[in-house]
Image (spheres, rainbow, N blue to C red):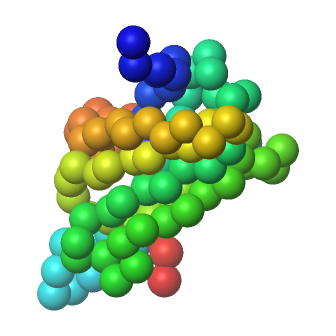
């Protein structure tokens, strides 16, 4: 029987700000689509068993492979990227005993942006 972990990959472009409420960080660009600040992270009951996470981003990223260690300051193995659209990413989770698990995830932050339930914060 193949070993598995109770983990899922999530993503969001919306964050809660104590002063501004629900916000989305945007880099507006004149000649190409706007970029959104997106958080990618793990959730699930087996999160304490995670040692590292390797995120494989879209080939258009210059540095496409991102290694994130699970630490007290980053318990959900959060990665922040700037992206303009949805794409599939491969996530390889290594647990504390060295086993590796592959999770495929399609970014979905675009769905939450359609709600309009946020304030846009323009980054320069």
Taking depth in this image into account, of 37 and 60 the one nearest to the observer is: 60
Position of 118 with respect to 96 (left or right) is left
Furthest residue in direction left, as rendered: 31
Position of 40 with respect to 48 (left or right) is left
Furthest residue in direction top, as rendered: 1
Taking depth in this image into account, of 19 and 14 the one nearest to the observer is: 14
Taking depth in this image into account, of 107 and 32 the one nearest to the observer is: 107
Q: Place residue 98 in its image quadrant.
A: top right
Residue 65 at x, y percent in the picture: 42, 68
Furthest residue in direction front, as rendered: 1
Taking depth in this image into account, of 51 and 41 the one nearest to the observer is: 51
Residue 58 at x, y percent in the picture: 25, 65
Count of numbered circles in the view: 0
Q: Which residue is painted at 30% across and 40% down in the image?
A: 105
- Note whether 60 is above or below 82 in the view shown: below
Residue 78 in view of the camera? no
In what quadrant of the picture does the N terminus appear?
top left
Furthest residue in direction bottom, as rendered: 31
Q: Which residue is painted at 40% across and 47% down in the image?
A: 91
Q: Which residue is painted at 29% across and 39% down in the image?
A: 104
Residue 67 at x, y percent in the picture: 55, 62
Residue 54 in view of the camera? yes
Position of 123 with respect to 114 (left or right) is right
Residue 122 at x, y percent in the picture: 46, 70
Q: Which residue is painted at 48% across and 83% down in the image?
A: 124
- Note whether 69 is above or below 12 in the view shown: below
- Note whether 72 is above or below 31 in the view shown: above
């Amino acid at each position: 029987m193949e070993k598995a972990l109770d983990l899922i990959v999530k993503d969001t472009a919306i964050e809660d700000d104590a002063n501004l409420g629900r916000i989305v960080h945007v880099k507006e660009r004149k000649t190409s689509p706007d970029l959104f600040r997106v958080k990618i992270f793990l959730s699930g009951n087996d999160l304490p068993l995670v040692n590292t996470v390797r995120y494989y981003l879209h080939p258009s990223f210059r540095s496409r492979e991102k290694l994130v260690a699970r630490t007290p300051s980053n318990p959900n193995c959060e990665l922040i990227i700037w992206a303009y659209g949805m794409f599939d990413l491969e996530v390889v989770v290594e647990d504390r005993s060295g086993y590796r698990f592959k999770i495929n995830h399609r970014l979905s932050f675009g769905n939450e942006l359609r709600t309009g339930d946020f304030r846009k914060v323009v980054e320069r």
